[in-house]
């Protein structure tokens, strides 16, 4: 019976199989398919190290304190009622926005300075200015901590040489905020420098020549040529830096551990304190995810703006 | 088709052959016949202390034919906690891990009860101290065994010469390195005397230095101060009790005491007070003997003047901050019986003696009957400097957050609520009532289900 059935369908199968084989071969020969397979290892890595942990964190944030049942967004609702949480939100915003502003400003100024250096020595300066960014952050922060050390601060020693009294760099909450922001600016400014330097190099020199003929001064050239030409790269670097600075952990943890009086805690350090040290993993996950939608939406708008400008320039 | 049939004769023949082979063949017990065990152990900062752990595990492994592998995990950056959390979430990793103080409660759902191990140890050494019970016994079961290695208390470590010269207090006579304590002298060592001597030492240019930052040294001494005045943040029944006369009394005390310390104490981490003592600038700190050990190495003239002794007494008693470390056995361990036996072995008195010796007296067992080890009597200079490190006399161990439910108290402790209250009043200029109200709101949040 089985044999009879097979023979009855045999002609149909023989006509279908070559067609399918041909279709598969065509799909495999497509450039997009090859590209997909070549990207597959990277996609697997991203899936394993980015997507899965992100989904896992979202799952954790919806659990109750004992991690026995899902409670939806109750953890977030609870956080909104906490005074310390709002203090952490404001501190994170102060930390990230101030640090990114100064990183961008210093990066822009330094990029112009380096760009105007004679070509001979420029490479050395570029290399030296990149050192803070290529050093392991926790190591460089330890160096800063020694300079700000509550008892044996190197800065205070220098100030004492000029007869200036001790500054409570890490003991006073406001000086502590200043110190951690300064460290972050020192670390992050070279990233802006290198990006802006690359952008400056890509501005066509004939634009400046034309402006000079029209009688534009240096400031007018900067405002009307340099800045518009760099707008996309400025947007992208600011976005990248905002995301990374909001998620910073090392600097605060090494220098202040969130103190004094919790006044230097930012999202990551407070999430660590709640989740790992105090054992409330769901609440810690909720704190760390709080900025995710805000940064996600900002990223969409900024990247849309960049894409729009790119289309306009083409 | 191949068909086999078993008849009575074949069955008997096969069974006989099998039995004969089992009886006749020699049983070869391999070097690791009883399997493997992996340990994730706190990386001790006293040089040589890890070697002792290696030696003891090797000795037990050879005797029991178990291959023991040890990974030392530092507590710097809380890497030990992160590792334990990752293993708990993954359900895979070491068989045995050491867990600091609150972490037994945090991971209890993934830990194997160890009641029979504890019963055997208590039979030998008597009951473990109150804080070990509080932290490791959940719903009547022991989920962690207090280990000697790394466990500590944080009593006073003071400069004998400076206290004698500037305050007229002979700490060696008050806290002798033997059982000949004078009760009247000991009773006189209270928070009032501590304050008045701190004032004199400040005037002399050698202030005491106790941290008021966010780390455990700050939380522990402030926690002990609050408890010695009878302050309860949250009680066993989830009642918030921070608003009390005792709390007001402590905060008033701290308004007088904090100006007697260097202003940078608000930023000190756990090493800040050690450095203060070792530098020779400070007259006293509250710390395990690690500061004294390093002083003897780096600044011997200071080390030779250090004397570890009891905390000051308050209206509700004399308390010292205690941070025990526990052995925990993961539920996913594949060799639980061997693991339990190893934990038992490492926690017995003979092994505890070796741990204490290897750590120059830093490691503190949770069993009071273990406090007769020679190391504490003999270690020096000065000889007997750490004799009073284990709580003797009326000193009791304590942990900030007690007696709240441990999962709630863990947040009270780690959020440094009491230290923050002190900082708000003494540094931030807030009123005592405002600081208490802030603490009440914070504590209310820790009680969430």
Image (cartoon, coloured by chain):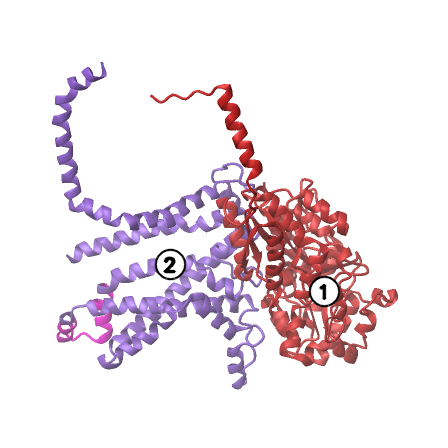
Chain colours: A purple, B red
Percent of width and height locating residue B382:
74, 75
Residue B162 x/y as whole percent: 74, 78
Q: Which mark is residue A242?
A: 2
Q: Residue at x 21, y 67 (%)?
A: A224
Q: What residue is drawn where x is 51% and y is 19%?
A: B8
In which quadrant will I find the C terminus of chain B?
top right
Q: Label 2 lies in what chain?
A: A
Q: Quadrant of residue B270?
A: bottom right
Q: Is residue B221 visible?
A: no
Please tell me whether the stretch drawn in magenta is mainly helix, strand or loop. helix
Where disc 1 sits, the SS reads loop
From the viewer's perspective, tell me whether residue B228 is left or right of residue A86.
right
Q: Position of residue B240 (x, y in %)?
A: 68, 47
Q: Is B224 in front, or is B136?
A: B136
Point out which mark residue B203 bears: none
Residue denoted by label 1: B155
Disc 1 crowd rating (10 Å Cα; few below 14, some 14-19, many 20+) is many
Query: Is residue A214 part of the magenta span, yes or no?
Result: yes
Residue A199 sits inside the magenta stretch: no
Q: Chain of mark 1?
A: B
Quadrant where the N terminus of chain B sits is: top left
Q: Position of residue B334 (x, y in %)?
A: 54, 43
Residue B216 visible? The answer is yes
In the image, B249: left or right of B329? right
Q: Residues within 10 Å of mark 2 (few under 14, many from 20)?
A: many
Task: Label 2: state its secondary structure.
Answer: helix
In the image, which residues are magenta?
A: A208-228
Nearer the observer: mark 2 or 1; the answer is 1
Q: Is residue A89 above or below residue B16?
A: below
């Amino acid at each position: 019976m089985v044999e009879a059935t097979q023979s009855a369908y045999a002609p149909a199968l023989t006509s279908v199989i070559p067609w399918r084989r041909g279709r598969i071969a065509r799909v495999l020969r497509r450039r997009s398919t090859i590209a997909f397979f070549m990207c597959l290892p990277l996609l697997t890595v991203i899936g394993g190290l980015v997507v899965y942990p992100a989904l896992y964190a979202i799952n954790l944030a919806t659990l109750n304190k004992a991690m026995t049942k899902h409670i939806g967004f109750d953890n977030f609702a609870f956080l909104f009622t906490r005074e310390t949480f709002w203090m952490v939100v404001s501190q994170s915003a102060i930390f990230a926005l101030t640090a990114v502003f100064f990183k961008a400003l210093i990066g822009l100024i330094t990029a112009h300075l380096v760009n105007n250096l004679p070509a001979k020595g420029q490479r050395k300066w570029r290399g030296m200015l990149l050192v803070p960014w290529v050093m392991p952050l926790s190591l460089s922060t330890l160096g800063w901590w020694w300079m700000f050390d509550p008892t044996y601060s190197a800065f205070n020693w220098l100030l004492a040489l000029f007869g200036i009294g001790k500054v409570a760099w890490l003991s006073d909450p406001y000086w502590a905020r200043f110190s951690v922001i300064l460290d972050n600016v020192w670390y992050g400014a070279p990233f802006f420098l290198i990006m802006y330097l690359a952008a400056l190099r890509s501005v066509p020199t004939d634009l400046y020549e034309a402006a000079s003929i029209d009688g534009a001064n240096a400031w007018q050239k900067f405002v009307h040529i340099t800045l518009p030409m760099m707008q996309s790269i400025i947007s992208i670097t600011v976005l990248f830096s905002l995301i990374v600075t909001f998620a910073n952990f090392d600097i605060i943890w090494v220098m202040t551990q969130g103190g004094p009086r919790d006044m230097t805690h930012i999202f990551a350090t407070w999430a660590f304190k709640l989740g790992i040290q105090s054992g409330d993993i769901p609440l810690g996950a909720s704190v760390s995810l709080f900025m995710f939608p805000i940064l996600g939406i900002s990223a969409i708008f900024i990247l849309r703006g960049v894409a729009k400008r790119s289309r306009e320039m083409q | 088709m191949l068909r086999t049939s078993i008849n009575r004769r074949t069955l008997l023949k096969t069974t006989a052959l099998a039995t004969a082979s089992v009886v006749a063949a020699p049983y070869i017990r391999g070097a690791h016949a009883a399997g493997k065990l992996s340990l994730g152990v706190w990386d001790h900062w006293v040089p040589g202390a890890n070697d002792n752990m290696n030696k003891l595990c090797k000795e037990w492994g050879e005797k029991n034919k178990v291959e023991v592998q040890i990974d030392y995990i530092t507590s710097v950056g809380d890497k030990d906690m992160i590792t334990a959390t990752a293993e708990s979430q993954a359900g895979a990793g070491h068989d045995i891990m050491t867990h600091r103080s609150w972490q037994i409660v945090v991971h209890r759902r993934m830990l194997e009860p160890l009641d029979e191990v504890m019963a055997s140890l208590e039979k030998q050494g008597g009951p473990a101290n109150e804080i070990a019970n509080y932290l490791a016994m959940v719903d009547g079961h022991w989920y962690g065994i207090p280990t000697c290695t790394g466990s500590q208390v944080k009593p006073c470590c003071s400069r004998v010469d400076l206290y004698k010269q500037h305050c007229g207090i002979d700490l060696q006579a008050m806290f002798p390195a033997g059982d000949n304590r004078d009760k009247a002298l000991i009773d006189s060592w209270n928070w009032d005397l501590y304050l008045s001597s701190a004032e004199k030492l400040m005037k002399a240019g050698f202030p005491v230095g106790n941290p008021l930052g966010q780390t455990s040294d700050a939380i522990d001494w402030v926690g002990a101060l609050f408890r010695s005045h009878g302050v309860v943040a949250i009680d066993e029944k989830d009642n918030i009790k921070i608003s009390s006369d005792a709390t007001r009394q402590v905060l008033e005390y701290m308004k007088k005491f904090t100006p007697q310390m260097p202003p940078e104490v608000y930023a000190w981490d756990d090493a800040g007070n050690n450095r203060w003592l070792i530098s020779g600038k400070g007259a006293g700190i509250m710390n395990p003997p690690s500061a004294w050990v390093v002083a003897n190495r780096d600044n011997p003239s200071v080390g030779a003047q250090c004397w570890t002794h009891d905390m000051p007494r308050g209206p509700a008693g004399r308390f010292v901050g205690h941070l025990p470390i526990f052995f925990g056995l993961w539920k996913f361990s594949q060799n639980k019986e061997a693991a339990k036996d190893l934990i038992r072995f490492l926690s017995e008195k003979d092994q505890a003696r070796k741990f204490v010796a290897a750590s120059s007296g830093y490691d503190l067992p949770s069993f009071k009957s273990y406090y007769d080890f020679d190391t504490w009597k003999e270690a020096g200079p000065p000889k007997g400097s750490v004799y009073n490190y284990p709580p003797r006399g009326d000193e009791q161990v304590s942990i900030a957050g007690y007696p709240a439910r441990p999962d709630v108290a863990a947040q009270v402790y780690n959020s440094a609520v009491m230290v923050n209250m002190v900082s708000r009043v003494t540094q931030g200029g807030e009123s005592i009532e405002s600081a208490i109200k802030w603490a009440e709101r914070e504590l209310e949040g820790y009680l969430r289900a």
